[in-house]
Image (spheres, rainbow, N blue to C red):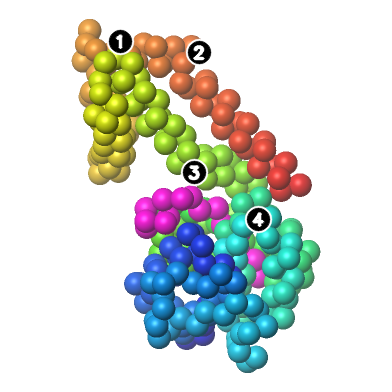
């Protein structure tokens, strides 16, 4: 990439992406960052990073290859219109703002804007996230692939053709870390109820969930087989699974939870 990137917002997710770009070398043309609060100290003095507080302070001749919106959704109404001047066939706009669909950006930037909408999740902050993205017809294949590569700097990135999938993606992987954190909380609390010291139970729950995720990633077996491998006939795990896998157990609860989150995502998108 010979032309610069323009990053709008450098909070946790923006910083994670910026770090990934610098480490991978994908930002060969440098990165301009607009962040009123200033970028994190880790980027101070980095030669390829120029941080300004406002769009008006950017170089007048700036011609970014991609404009990346990494601000909170509630800030987007004030932010997005200020970047209309970069709309053109050579510049793509990439957004990671939840609830802001492609139509929203077309109304704020113009129908001719090449737009890629992405839904990341919080493990991206440590390079372990997964992001799903889609684009409008104005985005070229090269622009879609470039945006996918930028997102892949924080983990795995997947391109889909149907924007309608993003609501369910938001529910599953966008909110997924919260559900896993709740599982850790509940597992630890159940251990305490069974007689374990709180600090030991907390650690057992945390490492068990983290290790199980790593095992699932490393294994060629599906999760169902891995579960069966842990479950001995007549053993303790089976007794627990009889409750968790009952007709009113975890599966229907999760189905209802994902359905509720998916519907809420649709409502937020308007």
Can residue 162 be seen in this snapshot? no
Q: Is the C-beta separation of discs 4 and 3 under 8 Å?
A: no
Pinpoint residue 195: horizontal percent, then vertical percent: 26, 15
Pinpoint residue 221: horizontal percent, then vertical percent: 27, 35
Q: Earlier in the sequence, mark 2 or mark 1?
A: 1
Tell whether 226 sits left or right of 7. left
Q: How far apart are marks 4 and 3 (CA)?
A: 18 Å
Q: Which of marks 4 and 3 is in front?
A: 4
Boundaries of the magenta span: 114-128
Q: Which residue is drawn at 61% across and 85% down?
A: 58
Name the residue tied to disc 1: 239
Instruction: Assess whether residue 56 is covered by the magenta stretch.
Output: no
Name the residue tied to disc 3: 173
Q: Which of marks 3 and 2 is nearer the N terminus?
A: 3
Q: Which of marks 4 and 2 is nearer the N terminus?
A: 4
Mark 1 residue crowding within 10 angstroms, few (<14) / some (14–19) / many (20+): few
Residue 232 quadrant: top left
Q: Which of marks 4 and 3 is nearer the N terminus?
A: 4
Instruction: Assess whether residue 116 is covered by the magenta stretch.
Output: yes
Q: Distance between the residues labelled 1 and 4?
A: 44 Å
Name the residue tied to disc 4: 73
Tell whether 43 sits left or right of 225. right
């Amino acid at each position: 990439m010979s032309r610069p990137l323009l990053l709008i917002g450098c909070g946790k997710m923006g910083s994670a992406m910026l770090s990934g770009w610098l480490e991978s070398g994908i930002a060969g043309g440098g990165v301009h960052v607009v962040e009123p609060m200033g970028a994190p100290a880790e980027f101070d003095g980095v030669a390829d990073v120029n941080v300004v507080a406002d769009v008006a302070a950017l170089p007048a001749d700036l011609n970014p290859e991609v404009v990346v919106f990494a601000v909170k959704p509630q800030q987007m109404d004030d932010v997005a219109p200020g970047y209309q001047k970069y709309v053109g066939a050579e510049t793509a706009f990439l957004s990671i703002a939840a609830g802001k669909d492609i139509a929203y950006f077309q109304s704020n930037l113009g129908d001719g804007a090449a737009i890629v909408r992405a839904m990341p999740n919080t493990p991206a902050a440590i390079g372990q996230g997964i992001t799903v993205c889609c684009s409008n017809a104005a985005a070229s294949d090269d622009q879609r692939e470039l945006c996918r590569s930028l997102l892949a700097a924080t983990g795995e990135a997947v391109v889909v053709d149907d924007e309608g999938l993003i609501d369910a993606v938001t529910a599953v992987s966008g909110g997924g870390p919260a559900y896993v954190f709740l599982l850790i909380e509940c597992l630890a609390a159940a251990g305490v109820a069974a007689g374990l010291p709180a600090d030991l139970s907390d650690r057992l729950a945390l490492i068990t969930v983290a290790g199980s995720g790593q095992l699932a990633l490393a294994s060629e077996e599906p999760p169902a087989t891995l579960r069966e491998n842990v479950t001995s006939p007549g053993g303790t795990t089976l007794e627990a699974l009889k409750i968790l896998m009952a007709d009113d157990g975890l599966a229907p609860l999760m189905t209802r939870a994902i359905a509720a989150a998916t519907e809420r995502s649709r409502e937020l998108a308007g």
